């Protein structure tokens, strides 16, 4: 079994612009505003129902979710990778940093980012 760092090294880079990354940041803004301190990395959840910024540590009832499908191509692609990798519509939770995206549960990498101007 590959270690997370070996798996990270084997992933291709997703070349994204700072503007594209900013769309991810904008989608997380309500989560950042609800905390009295900066929250990083950015955390999102996904399932067959959609993608939403996560503002709690546990289950988030559907009535409290703010679905953001279609608002960021990067997040849409990450959610697709997340559900296809696990071969499940249950999805899960993933973190996003300037370096890439990771499955929250085991810190397994989803993607590596290479930022451009």
Image: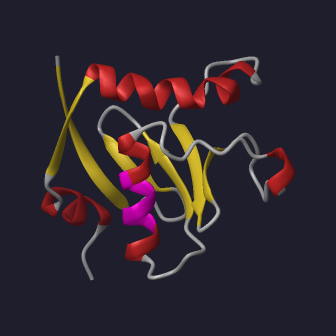
Q: Is residue 44 left or right of residue 101?
A: right
Residue 51 sits above or below residue 86 on the image: above
For this rendering, which residue is in front, 72 or 109? 72
The one nearer the camera, 31 or 97, is 31
Residue 64, compared with residue 31, is above or below; it is: below
Left or right of 21 in this view: 5:
left
What residue lies at 61% left-to-right and 27% top-to-bottom?
39
Residue at 75 percent across and 46 percent down: it is 65
Residue at the far front: name it. Answer: 70
Nearer-the-camera pick, 63 or 109: 63
Residue 104's x, y, as percent? 53, 56
Segment colored magenta = 77-82
Out of 26 and 41, give the one closest to the viewer: 26
Q: Quadrant of the C terminus?
A: top left
How far across and down, in percent of the image, does residue 40 sit?
Answer: 53, 30
- Direction from residue 61 to residue 101 in the image, left or right: left
Residue 41: horizontal and vertical position, in percent? 50, 35
Color scheme of the displayed model: secondary structure
Q: How many marks?
A: 0
Q: In which quadrant of the rendered image does the N terminus lie?
A: bottom left
The x and y percentages for residue 35 are 75, 23
Q: Is residue 65 left or right of residue 1?
A: right
> In this picture, is 3 found above or below 60?
below
* Main secondary structure type of the part rendered in magenta: helix
Q: Is residue 81 magenta?
A: yes
Name the residue located 13 percent from the left edge and 55 percent from the top edge: 12
Looking at the image, which residue is at 43% across and 41% down? 96
In the rendered image, residue 67 lying in the magenta stretch gets the answer no
């Amino acid at each position: 079994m590959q270690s997370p760092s070996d798996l990270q090294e084997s992933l291709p880079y997703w070349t994204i612009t700072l503007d594209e990354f900013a769309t991810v940041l904008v989608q997380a803004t309500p989560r950042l505003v609800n905390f009295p301190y900066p929250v990083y990395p950015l955390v999102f959840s996904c399932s067959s129902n959609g993608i939403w910024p996560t503002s709690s540590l546990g289950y988030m009832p559907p009535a409290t979710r703010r679905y953001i499908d279609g608002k960021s191509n990067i997040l849409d692609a990450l959610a697709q990778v997340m559900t296809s990798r696990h071969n499940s519509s249950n999805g899960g939770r993933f973190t996003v940093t300037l370096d890439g995206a990771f499955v929250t549960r085991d810190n397994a990498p989803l993607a590596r980012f290479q930022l451009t101007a």
